[in-house]
Amino acid sequence: MDRNQILLVGLPLFLLFSDIFNLFTPPPPKPAASHHRHHNPINTIPPPLIQQQSLEFPTQRANGFGGGIGFGNTVSIDFCASCSYRGTAVTMKNMLEAQFPGISVVLANYPPPLPKRLLGKLIPVFQFGVMGIIMGGEQIFPRLGYAVPPQWYYTLRANRFGSIATAWLLGNVFQSFLQSSGAFEVYCNGEPVFSKLKVHRFPGEIELKDLVAQRIASSRVL
């Protein structure tokens, strides 16, 4: 047999005997488990607990009685109703109630001075007086001692509807002027905080919030 035939016959025989040897050879022992596996620092250290703390603004913290920071405090906003300041007052009221939970905000009309109020009551008398004179002046003037009505009466009577409308409109304009006070006064717990009559301007929202916060803080200290 030449070399090639020996290789072709010997190689399969070698593989056959190696397989038979591995078949009867016992498997190698498994490695023993480590007795210190439970001491692995990677497995024993628990992941850190991340506590999420809510950011709490000072104006939103509750006091010891279970209410908001504004609990027990009262803010009064006295404004000029005839000056169309109600919208500004309502805006400030909503802002204070949001910034100071539990606070009581009271809106009220700031009356004009006493002389203006007295003159304001005379305006309707003037309006109805002009209307009465134009409609029945021929019977009114003789009772007042005038045999002939004055010339201005005939001028007004020549355009009675225009004269009545003019008197009514002018009376309303003066009435609105006399009822306006131009006030926007803010009080916190009975103490003045802001006065438009003194500074001649409206307060800003941040400015008013800071003023009320200072007043509440000072009242708590007292």
Image (cartoon, grey):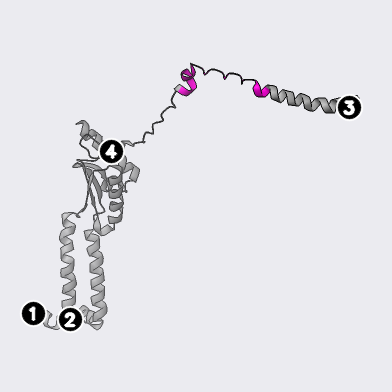
User: Residue beneath label 2, please?
Assistant: 135
Residue 79 percent across, percent down from the top left: 24, 52
Q: Which residue is mark 3?
A: 4
Disc 4 marks a residue whose amino acid type is: Ala
Under mark 2, the amino acid is: Met
Disc 3 to disc 4, C-alpha distance:
107 Å
Sequence-first disc among 4 and 1: 1
First in sequence: mark 2 vs mark 1 = 2
Q: Which marked residue is nearer to the observer: mark 3 or mark 4? A: 3
Q: Amino acid at mark 3?
A: Asn
Distance from Cα at disc 2 to Cα at disc 3: 148 Å
Q: Residue at x 47, y 23 (%)?
A: 43
Residue in view at x 58 percent, y 18 percent = 29
Q: Which region of the structure is painted magenta?
A: 22-43
The Cα atoms of the two marked residues, 2 and 4, are separated by 61 Å
Q: Secondary structure at mark 4?
A: helix
